[in-house]
Amino acid sequence: MGHCRFRHSGSELGNAGPVLDATTHILDSILESADCVESAALEVARRAGLRETTLEHVGLAVHEITLNAVVHGNRSNLHKKVIVTISRTPDTLQIVIADQSKGFDLDSVSDRLAPHGIVEGSGRGIFLARKFMDEFSVQRDRAGWHRVTMVKYL
């Protein structure tokens, strides 16, 4: 995990209340970054009181979306970074994963339960993340980064 850089943030106010725990991770566009982000998110999720299956679901969602950012977003370009912010309020766990790509249209991702979606090779991670997390959104920020925001209610 030497490639991970962590920066802890303060306790500013968020939309769901005071931020109890927040970290930002600046990662290289390598496959190992997904393991780093998953471990960091699971550590915060455990402290928030999530257990067993819910922890597994959060870990899988975070891992898959980070892999998408590295492989599909940044195309494993070592000159591009993935920035992840993990924060917890009294009511939510939020994970924002940003890459330096043009992004994708969420509506164009195949329905993995439709007959044609079952055999397609892509879209599984997005499908699982949307299923396992309580909120899932995709946007492009002002700086040009593609951001996926996932929220789990505590």
Image (spheres, rainbow, N blue to C red):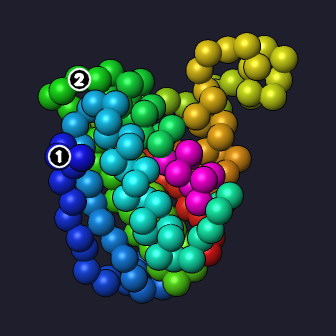
Q: Which residue is mark 2?
A: 77
Look at the image and give the residue range highlighted in magenta: 55-62
Circle 1 packing at 10 Å, graded few (<14), some (14-19), many (20+), is few
Q: Nearer the viewer, residue 86 or 135?
A: 86
Circle 2 packing at 10 Å, graded few (<14), some (14-19), many (20+), is some
Specify whether residue 14 is in view. Answer: yes
Q: Earlier in the sequence, mark 2 or mark 1?
A: 1
Q: Residue at x 50, y 67 (%)?
A: 45
Measured along the vertical axis of the image, is residue 21 above or below residue 137?
Answer: below
Q: Which residue is mark 1?
A: 2
Q: Is residue 38 left or right of residue 107?
A: left
Q: Do tag 2 and tag 1 residues touch (Cβ < 8 Å)?
A: no
Specify whether residue 142 is in view. Answer: no
Quadrant in which the C terminus appears: bottom right
Q: In the structure shown, which secondary structural element does the residue marked by tag 2 occupy?
A: loop
Q: Position of residue 35 (x, y in %)?
A: 38, 43
Q: Nearer the viewer, residue 134 or 27?
A: 27
* Magenta stretch contains residue 146: no
Q: Residue at x 52, y 84 (%)?
A: 90
Amino acid marked by disc 1: Gly
Q: Is residue 135 left or right of residue 86?
A: right
Q: How many dots with numbers?
A: 2
Q: In the structure shown, which secondary structural element does the residue marked by tag 1 occupy?
A: loop
Q: Residue at x 43, y 59 (%)?
A: 41
Spatial separation of the CA atoms under disc 2 and disc 1: 18 Å
Q: Residue at x 15, y 28 (%)?
A: 79
Q: Which mark is residue 72?
A: none
Measured along the vertical axis of the image, is residue 153 above or below residue 84?
Answer: below
